[in-house]
Image (tube, rainbow, N blue to C red):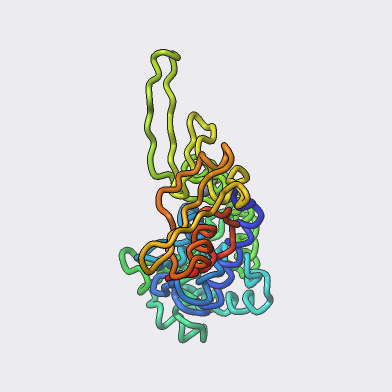
Amino acid sequence: MTIAKREREENQRTALSLMMSLLGDQAIDTTLFDSDVPPFADVVLRTTWEELAHADCVNRIGEGQYRLTAKGWLAALEVSGAARSGEYLERLGRVLAAMKAHVKGRRDSKVVDLRTLATEANESEGFIFNIIESRASSPGDEGRRGATWFERERGRLVEIPVDFNMEAVDIAAALTLPHLERIQALEERLERVEEERARHHCPYCDAEISGITGQDFPEHHAYVTYERFGCGLLLADGHEEEPCPYGPNWPQLEEFEFIAKENGNLWVCQPNAKTARARRIRVVLGEVGRTKEEAEENARISVGPKIKGQSEPKRAWP
Ligand SMILES: [Zn+2]
């Protein structure tokens, strides 16, 4: 079965929370996350990274390397609970006060460099970068005006409009209401991604489709589409022709006879199918061992059913 939707969402939340704690006050555009090392390795599923990338919450930079997008940062703030903390509102308040001070008594907007703002607000440049980048300081409704990057000086110069009038509470509101919509849009998007995945992945083990072929059967006036998956599953017009080792139609060990023969210094064990179901799986080669037991054990491993989430049993030899 496919990984349950709830489980996937939980894994996305875990991924976002982990990214948030590693990010701290650094800028999202220069902080990279490596999916292959802790705390992500073995915790965040490969499919979670794909889904977050599909939902524009992360960018893939290189193999196994990701960074948060502005949207991802907002989602991570929400998911990690940081967005609702008093400390976060206080910090926002300090940044906004520093911005406001620049346009007080002026008749035109003012451009300020990020570093100066950071010093004045006593906050990190990264934190302020993320606020401006995510437009958390400019929801653009209810007549509120927020700060933006000046022309092409992204990450360097901030333009503060003369009528800048954001309050920390506006930002909190901006994060919650549109964010709920964002989460909903994300979920709808994920459902579509899931439907798409379902068509291209084995329903039992999630292995990718490796080939689609069609065959014409003129005598039956039929055209059959065959889909082969990485795990060996073969579907003919959606019907299981050959099973997946993780699926319910894979034969049990009792459905084979294991016959080991000595061959020079080694033993070779060939699993022979005893039932119709066992005959549907393709066993080509006998398994080898230094002893009869090793050869039999390897043969049992090669045709035994597999369980999703469990690592493959260790071969007896080599
Ligand atoms: Zn499969």
Q: From the viewer's perspective, is residue 182 above or below residue 163?
A: above
Q: Is residue 112 something one can see in this rendering? A: yes
State the residue at coordinates (49%, 35%): 235
**Residue drawn at (68%, 76%) of the image:** 86
Residue 89 position within the rendered picture, expressed as x and y whole percent measured from the top left: 63, 74
Please name whichever residue, 263 or 39, is drawn nearer the observer in this view of the structure. Answer: 263
Q: Percent position (x, y) of residue 2? A: 59, 49
252 sits left or right of 129 in the view: right
Q: How many numbered discs, if any?
A: 0
Q: Is residue 187 above or below residue 298?
A: above
Q: Position of residue 69 (x, y in %)?
A: 45, 63
Which quadrant would residue 263 be assigned to in this image? bottom left
Residue 110 vs residue 146: left or right? left
Figure check: 248 above or below 78: above
Residue 289 rendering spot, x and y as whole percentages: 44, 66
Residue 163 seen:
no
- Identify the residue shown where x is 53% and y is 44%: 273
Q: Residue at x 56, y 45 (%)?
A: 203
**Which quadrant, please, contains the C terminus?**
bottom left
| Nearer the observer, 137 or 39 | 39
Q: Which image quadrant for residue 169? A: bottom right
Query: Between 202 and 100, which is closer to the camera in this rendering?
Result: 202
* Camera-nearest residue between 255 and 161: 255
Residue positioned most to the left? 152
